Amino acid sequence: MKIATWNVNSVKARITHLVDYLKTAAPDVLLLQEIKCVDKEFPHLEIEAAGYRAAVAGQKTYNGVSILAKQKIDVVVSRLPGDTADEQARYIEADVGTVRVASIYLPNGNPVDTPKYGYKLAWMERLHERVRALLKTELRVVLGGDYNVAPTDDDVYDPEGWKNDALCKPETRAAFRKTLYLGLTDAVHALHPEPHHYTYWDYMQNRWARDHGLRIDHLLLSPQAADRLTASGIDRGPRAKDKASDHTPVWCEIG
DNA sequence: ATGGTCGGGCTCCGA
């Protein structure tokens, strides 16, 4: 089973690229972030024509996550548990076949001297509790998404320039490690430990052409999923296109 | 220190 994650930066603006990706990469499951539309505006017709079903947790203008799959999707939750007052659509979790998957759009957190950073850290603590509960189930779990965390300096083209950014700050990395060390496996890092494999390149300053990127999109696997991990990678193709998202898909294969 | 680029929805916000 091939499971991929992609922050598309507007599913409507990216529908042609998205359908191209489904046809060429043919993932069994695709986790989307930043779809930037409400449920009723989601391009279901195009997705179905490509042979996929969709579960959507939409939101107007910002955020929004989705799960696409060739087979049936049984949604478990459409918001991250732990704060019923939080309306932001950044988490959807479902069973697809024998795998529990989640599409995660972790808050960016910048600027760090505003409540946005506190929201990020609080959200990460809620995610930690959700992961703890998921690991107790002993299911095959694949948590994919835009984590807005570059786990180490190896994941950043210019660590010194980014050291005070919400994606790289020590508190951010500590919170990420705390959840990882519950027993999750980073599917790309496990098979490709070399530094400087990026998943995101800012639109500004010609960063894609210069490979000035960061690795902030991850697929985190429970032990039961990691035992079956056979391959993983970053597919740079979609980022090279005209009118690309600023992120590119990350994938893994669960045997 | 500034401004560089996108998408959405509207003349600015979030990334």
Image: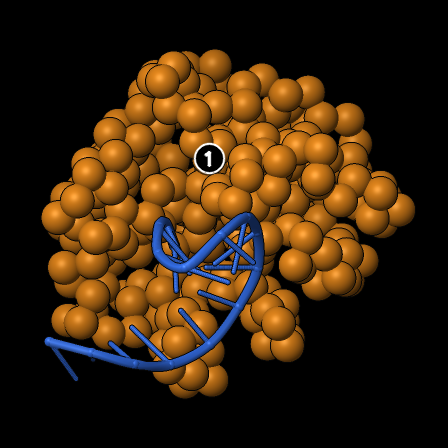
Mark 1 lies on residue = A90
Left/right placement of residue A7 relative to residue A68 reads left
Q: Position of residue A92 (x, y in %)?
A: 54, 29
Chain A palette colour:
orange
* Viewer-closest of A64 and A69: A64
Residue found 31% across the figure and 37% down from its top:
A180
Q: Is residue A142 visible?
A: no
Protein chain holding label 1: A
Query: Looking at the picture, how far across and down is residue A250, in whole percent?
Result: 54, 55
Q: Amino acid type of disc 1?
A: Arg
Chain letter matching colour blue: B
Quadrant assignment, res B1: bottom left
Nearer the observer, A115 or A102: A115
Residue A174's spot in the image, x, y percent?
Answer: 18, 42
* Along the line of sight, the residue nearer the viewer: A82 or A93: A82
Determine the residue positioned at 71% across, 63% down.
Answer: A17
Number of labelled discs? 1
In the image, residue A230 sits, relative to residue A118, either above or below, namely below
Residue lying farthest to the right in this orientation: A49
Which class describes the residues within 10 Å of circle 1: few (<14), some (14-19), or many (20+)? Answer: many
Q: Residue at x 25, y 52 (%)?
A: A110
Is residue A233 shown above or below A41?
below
Q: Residue at x 77, y 26 (%)?
A: A72
Q: Quadrant of the N terminus of chain A?
A: top right
Q: Is residue A166 something one can see in this rendering?
A: yes
Specify whether A216 is left or right of A38.
left
Image quadrant occupied by the C terminus of chain A: top right
The x, y position of residue A39, in whole percent, is 66, 33
Quarter of image, res A154: bottom left
Q: Is residue A171 left or right of residue A144?
A: left
Q: In the structure shown, which secondary structural element does the residue marked by tag 1 occupy?
A: loop
